[in-house]
Image (cartoon, helix red, strand yellow):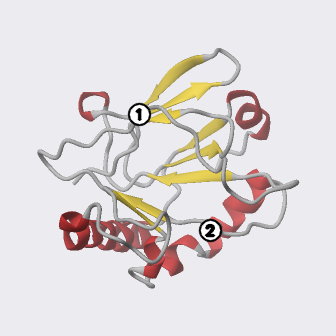
Amino acid sequence: MNVDLDKFKKQGYIHLHKVIPADVLKETRSRAIALKLKYKNRVGEPRHNGSGAFWNGLELASTLDPNLWKSYTSNFMYDISKLYLESEPYLFNDQVVVKLPDESFYFDPHYDNQFGPQGNHKTINCCWILTNMPVETGPLSCLNKSTQKYDLLPANAGDIVIIEGIFVYVQLCYVFF
């Protein structure tokens, strides 16, 4: 894995290519799609975890499928998280976002973790790319801190895009199947 902390700090994000082990990728993708299919008709219903209601994405997804916890807390993710946080990681939230075929589902530009842990905490988002996201289907797009322009990030299954949790606006973050 190519580590470029300076580039990450300058841009506010970094695109890591082919870092999710194939077996973990396959299992996580399968579980993410199964969760989406299971809960897709419950959007707007009350939920005891997360924001308090189901939406098109599933925050705290490992509470709905505890096996996802193994993916999020695997050794390779611990190493990546520790490296880019530059400290011991603490998992604050886990989320599954899947866009089904023919589903109208769009993220407006936004930033995450503004309501996260308060104080001297650095946060990052690790967006696992579970299926290919070419330009034609709507790739991830991140605001580059140094240029103040959005960078399109076509990505392939097995990639991870690490994004500063508070400062970088993100749009179009989908997992397609």
For marks 2 and 1, the one nearer the N-term is 2
Instruction: Return the x and y of residue 28 as percentages of the image width and height.
Output: 38, 70
Query: What mark, if any, has residue 137 been given in the picture?
Result: none
| Residue at the extreme left of the image, as rendered | 102
Find out whether the residues at labels 2 and 1 contact each other: C-beta distance under 8 Å. no
Q: Quadrant of the C terminus?
A: bottom left
At label 2, the amino acid type is: Phe
In the displayed structure, 150 sits above or below 65; it is above
Question: Viewed as shown, does residue 42 lie left or right of 26?
Answer: left
* Residue at 79% in and 56% down: 118
Instruction: Return the x and y of residue 107 as percentages of the image width and height.
Output: 38, 39
Which residue is under mark 2?
76
Question: Viewed as shown, does residue 23 lie left or right of 17?
Answer: left
Instruction: Return the x and y of residue 142 as percentages of the image width and height.
Output: 53, 31
In the displayed structure, 56 sits above or below 91; it is above
* Residue at 35% in and 71% down: 46
SS category of the residue bearing label 1 = loop
Which residue is under mark 1?
108
How packed mark 2 is, by other alpha carbons closer than 10 Å (few <14, some 14-19, many 20 or more), is some
Q: Disc 2 or disc 1, which is closer to the eye?
A: 1
